[in-house]
Every structure is written in structure tokens, then in C-alpha cells.
Amino acid sequence: MRRQLPIHVGLVCVCGLALTAVVLVALGSPDQPRPVTAQEPELPEADGAAVLDYILNQNPYTEWGSWPPDRWTDFGGLVPGGPPHGNTVRIFVNDIALEAAAAEEFDGLLPPGSIVVKENYNGSVDDPGDLAALTIMYKVAGYNPDANDWFWVKAAGDGSAIDAEGAPEDCTGCHGQAGNADYMLRYAFGDEPVAIYSEPLPE
């Protein structure tokens, strides 16, 4: 007489087979493309408060790098500034912009998701004083095609208040001067920049 398995053992086997099938379906075959993991943290919308939260809390800009030095400016620390920014500034650039600019096929236009943060100080390079303001450029696809899709924010140094956001004419007009590189005045990806606030570095 054949002995039958207890019902609970049969259920375990069925459940185990079902779980294995689910795992195999989730993994897919080696020939199928794997899903792309979303960037963490997710980039913000074109909104001043959201951009500030992103650069201050979610992806702190102070942990980013800056433009590589060229013969006009060394961006490794505080550098002389000028109106409408502070007498001294420090520039931070996110990885999206830095990696794009370093690529051999770079065409001079930074991709969507690029963010440049400028700290503005009223003092000198040797004694900058307190952080007076943050000015931010954030490229958002389709935001403002007439000005290369840059979204601008000017905020208090501690991020407690937003003085301007969007596409202020003062920002787009100044950064849109002829001869610049994608609205970058201080850095021109190897060419001479539109704005030079200090003696050029040696050749």
C-alpha cells in the first residue's frame, strides 16, 4: 500500500515551486536587459524649495567636486568674485555635469540634471566671512529652451529664504553674453571664459 504524504508537506512543495518560479521570472534570462536602477536620490523638479532641499539635504553640494583648473582660474577653493555675486565665491558642480564635460565627445552643452552651486561671500579670499548667499543653476529638460533649459535659484546662505527663482532676466542676460559656454561665465571648458576676476594662471 502506497503511503501518502501529509497535506502540509505537499503544500510546502507546491509553495516552494511557486516561489522558485517567481524568482526566475523576476531575474529574467541572461539575454534580457535588466531594469535600470533610478538615480538616488531622485533629481528635483524645477522648484526653488525642492532644489534647495536636494542640494542641502538629499545630495549635499559641499560633497561635490568643482571644475578642473584652467589657465584662468583654479576652482579648487575660494576664488575672487564680482557683482552681482560676492567679492569671493566658491563653485561646486555635480557629477552629471563633471562627467559630461570630461567626455571626449562633449559638445559644449551640459546635459539635463547638471547642477552648479555658487557660494557667495562678501569678504576676501583670505577672510570671506559668513556665507551670504547661494546661487544655483539647474538644467531641467524642456524648462526654458530659449536659455538652454537652465532653472535659476538665489537663496540665503543657510537656505532659509529664496530671493529669486525661475529664469530671471538678470541671470539669463548676464550668463547669456556672447562667447560664453552654455551660460557658464567662469568656466569655458578649455576656452577663454567671458568673465575673469583674477590674474590668469600661468600657461
Image: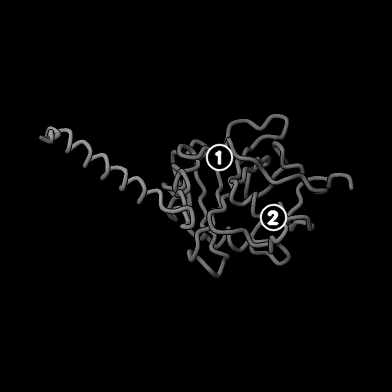
Which residue lies at the image location 64% right of the left edge and 43% below the top edge?
Answer: 91
Q: Position of residue 163 (x, y in %)?
A: 47, 48
Foreground disc of the pair 2, 1:
2
Residues at marks 2 and 1 touching, judged by CB atoms closer than 8 Å: no
Disc 1 marks which residue? 61
Q: Is 132 on the left or on the right of 200, as rendered?
A: left
Give the quadrant of the N terminus.
top left
Q: Which mark is residue 174?
A: none
Q: Is residue 46 above or below residue 12?
A: below
Between 183 and 106, the residue placed more toward the observer is 106
The answer to whether any part of residue 110 appears in the image is: yes
Q: Position of residue 63 (x, y in %)?
A: 58, 35
Q: Which residue is mark 2?
A: 103
The residue shown at (53%, 69%) is: 145
In percent of width and height, residue 138 lies at 53, 53
**How dense is the environment of label 1, judged by Cα within 10 Å: few (below 14), some, or many (20 and up)?**
many
Q: Does 4 appear above or below 28?
A: above
Give how far apart the Cα atoms at labels 2 and 1 are. 22 Å
**Residue pushed farthest right?**
203
Residue furthest out toward the front: 1
> Observer-nearest residue: 187 or 13?
13
Reading the chain from its start, which is encountered first: label 2 or label 1?
1
Few, some or many residues within 10 Å of mark 2 (<14, 14–19, 20+): few
Q: Is residue 7 visible?
A: no
In the rendered structure, which amino acid carries the disc numbered 2?
Answer: Ala
Indicate the position of residue 202 as horizontal and vertical percent values.
Answer: 88, 45
Instruction: Tell which residue pokes out farthest to the bottom in this image.
Output: 146
**Disc 1 residue type (three-letter):** Tyr
Identified at 17% across, 33% down, the residue is 9
Q: Secondary structure at mark 2?
A: loop
Number of labels in the image equals 2
